[in-house]
Amino acid sequence: MKKERDLYRDFLKSKDLKMTKPRLIIMEAVFENHEHFNIDDLYEQIRKKHKNVSRATIYRTVPLLVEAGLIKQSLRCESKDIYEHTYGHENHLHFICDNCGKIIESGFSDVAILIDLLAKNENFEIKEYNLGARGLCKDCQKKRIINEK
Amino acid sequence: MKKERDLYRDFLKSKDLKMTKPRLIIMEAVFENHEHFNIDDLYEQIRKKHKNVSRATIYRTVPLLVEAGLIKQSLRCESKDIYEHTYGHENHLHFICDNCGKIIESGFSDVAILIDLLAKNENFEIKEYNLGARGLCKDCQKKRIINEK
DNA sequence: AATTTTAATGAGAATGAATCTCAAATGCAT
DNA sequence: ATGCATTTGAGATTCATTCTCATTAAAATT
Ligand SMILES: [Mn+2]
Ligand SMILES: [Mn+2]
Ligand SMILES: [Zn+2]
Ligand SMILES: [Zn+2]
């Protein structure tokens, strides 16, 4: 939490943005848990302690955290943008179950090497990977077999 | 276009859905061009010839084409869901330029092999890959250098 | 071919995530 | 402390998507 705050401070300073109370509250809430989250989750979480932080400010602040490189926009879920930490988290890919919505994470060091090669071919400079697949998780495969009987 | 229509017919029959005039018009419009498209693009395209096909029906029909395996939901662009053909198109990944929005496609046969391995580890059954990266295209890298002077 | 049954459609209303507006509040350099 | 540009909260607005429901069309049955 210490490092994140410092990076955030530096980022804001570098952009001539002010370190305000809501911006601090929001960034601390974001790093309180380590799950994927959407703006509404975050709003509810923050509201428990701070009755006066507005949804608008959260919508305005989250993109700053993205730009600062602390979080990234991840997959979309239930028609909502969802986010996850990047700072302090390994790159990983998502397997999303079409049936139950479960998200399974998996490292992808080797995959990245190949994708870097493809990108090089196109002279494309990658800033952020966005890798995953949809399908059926272990449990839902079993259910399917039962249902299709 | 012949094959797509037959597959679609079979799919509708298998689901006890009727082959209606709007459903046919929409599926033909979808396969008229080979670009990524969003619902609004499709609506405009269809409206040129058929003044009476409603937006609602397009929103209702596109998911059928997805379920039939003819198209897939692809990346999101300008806050709109976008779609692309799957039938008759190789699997590929997308490099998306953060600066100009350009979408670069690239095959990924080798990548798929690695991802299949990761999926196997998790006992996850992949139905559809969703692979890409965001960053800067060749042209925008040059522009950046100029701008940062 | 006419009738019945049932699903699908069009038009527009409703929803809801995300963005915008603007008067009031706050951070920060002096 | 003072002054001033930036940021904020609250609610209005936007706009993609979904829903509603009276009407229409497809297919099954006579
Ligand atoms: Mn994740
Ligand atoms: Mn594509
Ligand atoms: Zn599952
Ligand atoms: Zn570009």
Image: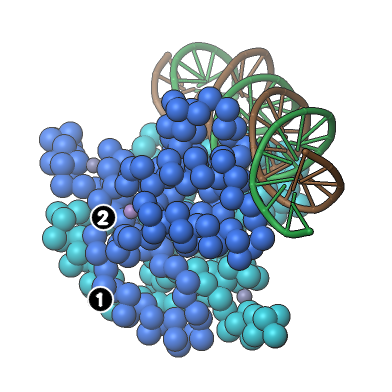
Chain colours: A blue, B cyan, C green, D brown
Mark 1 crowd level (few <14, some 14–19, many ≥20, 10 Å Cα): few
Could you say where residue C5 lies in the image, as x and y percent from the top left? 44, 15
Tell me the quadrant of the picture where the C terminus of chain B can be found.
Answer: bottom right
- The residue nearer to you, when weighing B64 against A22, is A22
Relative to A100, say whether B73 is above or below: below
User: Left or right: where does residue C18 sit relative to residue B147?
Assistant: left
Q: Tag on residue A110?
A: 1
Q: Is the CB of mark 1 within 8 Å of ligand 1?
A: no
Task: Work out how far the residue at label 2 is from the one at label 1, CA to CA, in angstroms.
Answer: 15 Å
- Tell me the element at label 2: strand
Residue drawn at (50%, 57%), measured in percent from left and top?
Answer: A8
For the residues bearing labels 2 and 1, Cβ distance under 8 angstroms: no
Could you say where residue B103 lies in the image, as x and y percent from the top left? 56, 70
Q: On the image, which quarter does residue A42 sit in? A: top left
Relative to B79, say whether A119 is above or below: below
Which subunit holds the residue at mark 2?
Answer: A
- Tell me the element at label 1: helix
Q: Tag on residue A105?
A: 2
Residue drawn at (59%, 32%), measured in percent from left and top?
Answer: A54
Mark 2 crowd level (few <14, some 14–19, many ≥20, 10 Å Cα): some
Residue drawn at (25%, 51%), measured in percent from left and top?
Answer: A104
Amino acid at dot 2: Glu
Could you say where residue B128 lies in the image, as x and y percent from the top left? 33, 58
